[in-house]
Each structure stands twice: as C-alpha cells, then as structure tokens.
C-alpha cells in the first residue's frame, strides 16, 4: 500500500486525570468502524499526562482493527513556546494548542485534525478526498456563522471580535474538524511565531483561544465545507439521519459522558465506547453511563454541598458570559479604525 492510500488523522489532548484518553478511543473506534478497508494512520499528540495504561489501550484498539497509531510527545514543543511567550494564558488550553505543532512533527503533506468529543458516522475518506485547491485548511462554519447565513444576527460581542480579527461574519469556522494542508503551512506559515504575535495583540479580547487564532491566521485561505463534516446542531435528528455526518459534541458541560442533550447523537458515543478496550461488556457499559451521569453537576444526590456547587456553577456561567472582554475589544476596534483614518489622510 502506497503512502497515497493512507489517510492521516491527528488527535491532540492533555490528560492530567487520565480520563480523557477514553474519549479519544471513541473517536478512533468510530473512524475504524466506518473506514471501509482504508488504512488510517492516527497520530496522537500528547504530553507526559498520557499514562502507560491509556497508551496501551489506544494501541490495542488500533491493533484490533489492523490499523496503526503513533504517539508524538509534544511537551518540549509546548514548553519552548511558553519560554518564548511572556504572560500568554496557554496552560489552560494546553491540549488544544498541541495542534499548532502538526506541521512541525508530521512528515505528511496533509492531515485531518479532530477534537476528541467527536464521533465519525461516515467513511472518513469522504472528508480526506475533498480537494483543498491549495487552501491552507478546510473547515466547517461554526454554528453562529450558519445562523448568520440563515438570517439571524451574530451575537454582538462575537461580531465585534470577528471585525477586530478581520474575519468575515459568514466565514468564521469551527476548528474541531479541520483538513490541514501541512505542505503549504510549512512553506507559508510559521504557526508558533504567529501565535505569539496574535496573543500579544488580542489575548485580552478573545475567549476561544486557539479557534480564534486559526480563524485569524487562515482568514481568506480556508475552504469552507458542508455542515455534515462537522455537525454540531443535532435538533431534529433521527436514527435514520445520523448516518453521513461527523458529529461534534461541542459545548462546555454538554458532553455525552456527563449529560444527555442530543437525542440519538449522544447514543453514538456509548455505542462506539463499547467497541474499545475501555468497555468489556454491556454490564460495564451500563456502569460507565450511570457513573458519568452521576458525576455531572446537573445530576447529583441532594446534600449540604448543593449550595457550594450551585455557587460554583454561577461563577462559571458569569465567566463564560465574557462580559469582561468587551472593553478591550472596543478599544482595539477604536485604534484599528483610527489607524485606517490616519492612513487615508496621509494618502490625501
């Protein structure tokens, strides 16, 4: 089998509690089950938090499907980036930042990047075979942009951030599923350098750190794909319409392992978990489902601890409202417009 017949897929995560590798296994199992005989090389970007037990489980999963997986420790890449940074808030986004090193650590010309809250309910070759037409990346519009195309207004603060970043309101994409043209990125972009520039300018304005950066750096150089390649909106879905999409369980606490918010779609997570080394039989599957639901802050046994948990939830909700980002965004937009005005006057 030649290299041209190989589909390259990358996953990236940080796993300090040792619980996140299981979700990566679900994504891998869904790819393998639907690959229809194609060879899929999965590349896992990780750091020291990937323990030996989880590493062995992921390797066994690939072996069971006669596929290959390789583990790429990018901790040193990340630490080097931190040294070059000054006060950039990278640690909280460590796992998602790992994808920025793909062009440095992979020799392939192209790769599909996937978040680990994803189930691939289609042949991944369909996405792999989409012509990039020399774009640096291919991705699907995010839910806000899709709503905008359907006549809804973009949330005010988001619209201001996109204006600041130079991203058109009909083009902001979700970075959870991307096809990356690694050859072009190596030749025309130096992502680690640009991320430092980006954070120095906009870190007080943004909330979706790596996604905002990727939209900024690839603005005008991204191929926008059909929604089915990164399906987030599950409203109206039926068992019959599940097939043919890559389902992305995006959203803070709305994950299938801790809540049930997407009928039929969340079921897929448990279906594919059963096919991994993390679940040996149906009894264990039931136990894992109940254990996950019980761990959710929205489902618990009533106790004196409830008040503390509700206050913590309120605090998190206020933080996610991003109200503290508005003044820096408006100030940056003012400076940007002032710079343009001065430029026009000089031209006159």
Image: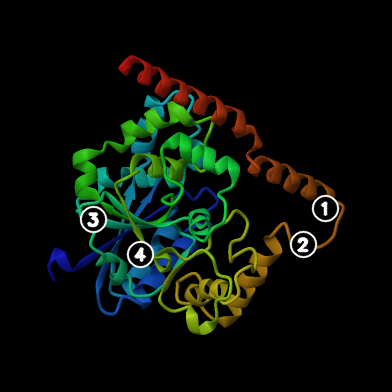
Rounded to the nearest angstrom, the CA distance separating label 4 from label 3 is 23 Å
Frontmost residue, 69 versus 209: 209
Q: Is residue 336 left or right of residue 283?
A: left
272 w.r.t. 255: above or below = below
Tell which tag, 4 or 3, sits nearer the viewer: 3
Which residue is labeled 1 in the image? Answer: 306
Crowd band around label 4 with a 10 angstrom C-alpha radius: few (<14), some (14–19), many (20+): some
Rounded to the nearest angstrom, the CA distance separating label 2 from label 1 is 9 Å
Between disc 3 and disc 2, whose residue precedes? 3
Rounded to the nearest angstrom, the CA distance separating label 3 from label 2 is 45 Å
39 w.r.t. 173: above or below = below
Frontmost residue, 14 versus 123: 123
Rounded to the nearest angstrom, the CA distance separating label 2 from label 4 is 35 Å
Task: Point out residue 347 in the picture as x, y percentages from the top left corner.
Answer: 31, 18
Tell which tag, 1 or 4, sits nearer the viewer: 1
Which residue is labeled 2 in the image? Answer: 300
- Identify the residue at image location x=52%, y=37%: 206
Crowd band around label 3 with a 10 angstrom C-alpha radius: few (<14), some (14–19), many (20+): many
Rounded to the nearest angstrom, the CA distance separating label 3 from label 1 is 49 Å
Task: Point out residue 58 in the picture as x, y percentages from the top left corner.
Answer: 39, 64
Tell me if I can see residue 133 in this picture. yes
Rounded to the nearest angstrom, the CA distance separating label 1 from label 4 is 40 Å
Tell me if I can see residue 207 in this picture. no
Between disc 3 and disc 1, whose residue precedes? 3
Which residue is labeled 4 in the image? Answer: 59
Determine whether the residue tagged by mark 4 lies in a helix, strand or loop: helix
Determine whether the residue tagged by mark 3 lies in a helix, strand or loop: strand
The label shown at residue 110 is 3
- Identify the residue at image location x=49%, y=25%: 87
Tell which tag, 2 or 4, sits nearer the viewer: 2
- Discs 2, 1 touching: Cβ within 8 Å: yes
């Amino acid at each position: 089998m030649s290299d041209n017949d190989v589909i390259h897929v990358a996953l990236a995560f940080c796993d300090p509690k040792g619980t996140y590798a299981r979700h990566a296994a679900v994504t891998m199992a869904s790819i393998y089950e639907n690959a229809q005989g194609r060879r899929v090389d999965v590349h896992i970007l990780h750091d020291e938090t990937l323990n030996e037990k989880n590493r062995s489980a992921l390797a066994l999963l690939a072996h069971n499907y006669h596929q290959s997986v390789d583990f790429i420790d990018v901790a040193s890449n990340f630490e080097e980036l931190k040294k070059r940074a000054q006060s950039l808030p990278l640690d909280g986004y460590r796992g998602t930042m790992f994808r920025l090193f793909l062009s440095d650590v992979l020799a392939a010309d192209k790769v599909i990047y996937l978040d680990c809250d994803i189930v691939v309910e289609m042949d991944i070759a369909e996405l792999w075979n989409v012509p990039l037409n020399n774009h640096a990346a291919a991705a699907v519009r995010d839910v806000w942009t899709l709503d905008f195309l359907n006549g809804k207004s973009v949330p005010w603060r988001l619209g201001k951030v996109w204006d600041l970043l130079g991203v058109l309101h009909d083009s902001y994409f979700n970075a959870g599923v991307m096809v990356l043209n690694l050859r072009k990125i190596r030749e025309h972009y130096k992502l680690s350098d640009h991320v430092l520039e980006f954070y120095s300018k906009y870190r007080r304005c943004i909330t979706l750190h790596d996604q905002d950066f990727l939209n900024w750096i690839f603005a005008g150089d991204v191929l926008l794909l059909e929604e089915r390649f990164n399906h987030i909106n599950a409203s109206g879905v039926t068992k019959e319409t599940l097939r043919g999409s890559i389902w992305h369980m995006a959203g803070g606490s709305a994950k299938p392992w801790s809540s049930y918010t997407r009928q039929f779609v969340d079921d897929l997570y448990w279906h594919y978990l059963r096919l991994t080394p993390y679940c040996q039989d149906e009894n264990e599957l039931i136990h894992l489902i109940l254990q996950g639901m019980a761990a959710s802050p929205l489902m618990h046994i009533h106790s004196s601890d409830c008040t503390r948990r509700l206050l913590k939830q309120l605090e998190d909700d206020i933080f996610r409202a991003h109200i503290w980002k508005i003044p820096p965004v408006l100030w940056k937009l003012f400076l940007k417009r002032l710079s343009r005005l001065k430029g026009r006057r000089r031209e006159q």
